[in-house]
Image (spheres, helix red, strand yellow):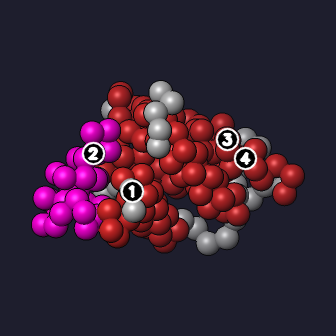
Amino acid sequence: MEHVLREGVATLSLRPLAAALGTSDRMLLYYFGTRDELLTAVLDAVGEQLQTGLTAALPDGPVPPGRLLPALWASLEDSGAAAPVRLYLEVSGLAARGRQPFADLARRVAEDWLSWVGPRLDVPDHERAAAAAGLLAALDGVLLVDAVAGRERARAAAGWLGARLGRDDS
């Protein structure tokens, strides 16, 4: 996981990964089956670790979207989540190009996050799926702004979006 977080996935090859881990590529295949299964296991572990950290930083119980977006951003900003976020953005970019296995992996990661964030939203049940997708879209946008335009602009975007989402929270 540390190697993938440090080096990324676009050019991940089993031999260099095995060498960095002090093992052989055959052992990686023995334990994971394929490179794609290894990537899936790594992304699952990274996502689980990130969700655990976010869960601990969020308020208890469902939260209105206007409060949840800034809380998620603040937790990501302060938690040292830069490497997992870079990995997420890299996988998403490769998926957007239609590259496999990244398209399938990104879809799975998105579904996991939507399932995770949905119950944390204080919205009517019939709006939950759309609200979760909207919140993920907004958070992804803030993460992308952070990556390409800088932290201050991302912080401002998260605050602005949270305030606009909060108009319907009363």
Cα–Cα span, label 3 and label 1: 34 Å
User: Do the CB atoms of the residues marked 3 and 1 lie less than 8 Å apart?
Assistant: no
User: Do the CB atoms of the residues marked 2 and 3 lie less than 8 Å apart?
Assistant: no
Does residue 88 appear to the left or right of 9 in the view shown?
A: right
Mark 4 packing: few (<14 Cα in 10 Å), some, or many (20+)?
many
User: Do the CB atoms of the residues marked 4 and 3 lie less than 8 Å apart?
Assistant: yes
What residue would you read off at disc 3?
A: 134
Give amino acid for label 2.
Leu
- The residue mark sitting in front, 2 or 3, is 2
What residue would you read off at disc 1?
A: 34
Q: Is residue 107 something one can see in this rendering?
A: yes
Q: Residue at x 75, y 44 (%)?
A: 130
Q: Is residue 63 something one can see in this rendering?
A: no
What residue would you read off at disc 4?
A: 131
What residue would you read off at disc 2?
A: 12
Which structural element holds mark 2? Answer: loop
Q: Residue at x 84, y 55 (%)?
A: 124
Give amino acid for label 1.
Thr
**Magenta segment, which residues?**
1-28
Mark 3 packing: few (<14 Cα in 10 Å), some, or many (20+)?
some
Q: Position of residue 166 (x, y in %)?
A: 68, 45
Q: Position of residue 85 (x, y in %)?
A: 39, 48
Q: Nearer the viewer, residue 131 or 108?
A: 108
